[in-house]
Image (cartoon, rainbow, N blue to C red):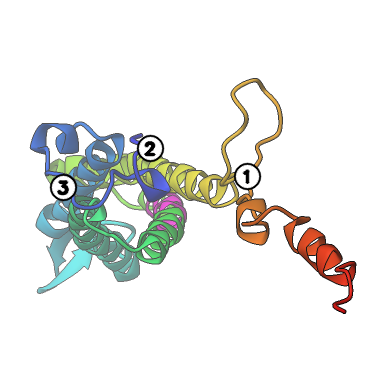
Amino acid sequence: MDGGGAYGGGKAGAPFDPIAFVQRPQVILRAVCLLFAIIVFGCISSKGYIEKGGKEVCLYNNDANACNYGTGIGVIAFLASIGFLAGEYLFEQMSSVKTRKHYVLGDLGFSGFWAFLYFVGFCYLTNAWNKSDRPKDGYGINNVQGAIAFSFFSIFTWAGCAWFAFQRFKQGTDAAFAPSYEADPTGGQGYTSYPDATDAAYQEPPFAQQQQKGMGDFQAPAY
């Protein structure tokens, strides 16, 4: 990660480099999260339901909540990934350290929470599918299993995003408590120089006035 600015970002106002941007680990991982989210909700939306008795029934053990849960976390993950990609683009332009800190904490909290929701979704969909009757002619099996598989993969991608956000936060915290003085080149403790006050205090010889006063005290009396 680039340590040129606060919280692992470059210095604010630096020119935008698109090649360096797309090569960032955070950007790559966020793009993978975006792709996996599309696959999860796309698989369930396209062939996650089958028509029975004139109405659509979820293939996950006829449990509409399972289909709704998988679609919901996928759609929100898709939107959140777009938002965080935009945040990565704007991160370099954030001149305020507090703004960067709030963004990093938001990334950490959301990514960790969404990794947990994908874990719950993976367990939920897997359990429901194991209890389901296989649809006639294998309709939608690949889509249903694909949604389960990419829910599993999404656990690690979102956990990876949370880990990168934690590293950023730790880097920003370490920089905040770093010593602000420079050490002596010889390895000793740093010091500061004090202004020389003797020039202002003694602009005249210190004993000049006393000598003149003494000479006046011992003048011979006039007759």
* Residue 187, percent from left and from top: 67, 23
| Mark 2 burial class by Cα count in 10 Å: few <14, some 14-19, many 20+ | some
Give the dominant element type of the magenta stretch: helix, strand or loop.
helix
Cα distance, mark 3 to mark 2? 48 Å
- 3 and 2 marks in contact (CB < 8 Å): no
Do we see residue 202 in this rendering?
yes
Cα distance, mark 1 to mark 2? 28 Å
Q: Is residue 126 above or below residue 208?
A: above
Q: Residue at x 37, y 45 (%)?
A: 161
Helix, strand or loop at label 1? It is loop
The magenta-colored residue range is: 114-126
* Residue 164, percent from left and from top: 41, 42
The disc label shown at residue 192, or none: 1
Mark nearer the N terminus (3 vs 2): 2
* Residue 159, percent from left and from top: 43, 44
**Can you identify the residue that label 3 sits on?**
140
Residue nearer the viewer, 154 or 173: 173
Q: Residue at x 70, y 52 (%)?
A: 205
Q: Residue furthest front?
A: 223
| Image quadrant in which the C terminus is located | bottom right
Quarter of the image for residue 74 reads bottom left
Q: Amino acid at mark 3?
A: Gly
Q: Is residue 200 left or right of residue 27?
A: right
Residue nearer the viewer, 54 or 167: 167
Q: Residue furthest top?
A: 186
| Mark 3 burial class by Cα count in 10 Å: few <14, some 14-19, many 20+ | many
In magenta segment, residue 2: no
Q: Is residue 133 left or right of residue 199?
A: left
Q: Amino acid at mark 2?
A: Gly
